[in-house]
Image (cartoon, rainbow, N blue to C red):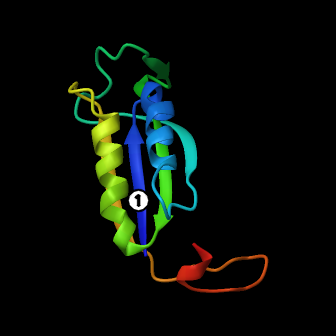
Amino acid sequence: MKEIKAYIKPHKLAQVTMALRKLEGLTGMSVVDVRGFGRSRGKDAPHRVVQDLIDYVPHVKIEIACRDELANEVVEVIEKIAHTGLRGDGKIYISTIDQVVRIETGERGEDVV
């Protein structure tokens, strides 16, 4: 199983979500509003947030747990749809999940995803 974390621009969320919903076998995703900075350190960002003397840029974090065979397709969709060609488009991280547990039933393994 894989965990995919993607940091994208907020205005791309609806398009990315619609594209991901079309993937057969994708069981869900979580979305979190986040803020931070990367290589540009938030300079000249159109929606700059200043807090505690640090410039943060708003992004959206998408978290997806999926079967190994679906991971590449998920990444390709996010990469294609979230791309604007501008600095700060975001990043995608892919990690391996060792185990999943459904809290409600105690069920474990890939079927939980």
Quadrant of the rendering where the C terminus is positioned: bottom right
Label 1 environment density (alpha carbons within 10 Å; few <14, some 14–19, many ≥20): many
Q: Quadrant of the N terminus?
A: bottom left
Residues 94 and 55: in front is: 94
For label 1, the residue is 4
Can you tell which quarter of the image residue 54 is in?
A: top left
Where residue 43 sits in the image (x, y, percent)? 29, 19
Q: How many marks?
A: 1
Please tell me whether mark 1 sits on a helix, a strand or a loop.
strand
Determine the residue positioned at 34% across, 36% down.
81
- Residue 82 rendering spot, x and y as whole percentages: 34, 35
Relative to the observer, which residue lies in front, 25 or 94?
25
Q: In the image, residue 56 lies at what x, y percent?
A: 42, 27
Say above or below: 88 vs 18: above
Residue 88 occupies quadrant:
top left
The residue shown at (56%, 85%) is 109
In the picture, measured across the screen, residue 103 lies left or right of residue 5, that is: right
Q: Amino acid at mark 1?
A: Ile
Using the rendered view, name the quadrant where residue 86 is placed. top left
Query: Depth check: 111 or 37 in front?
Result: 111
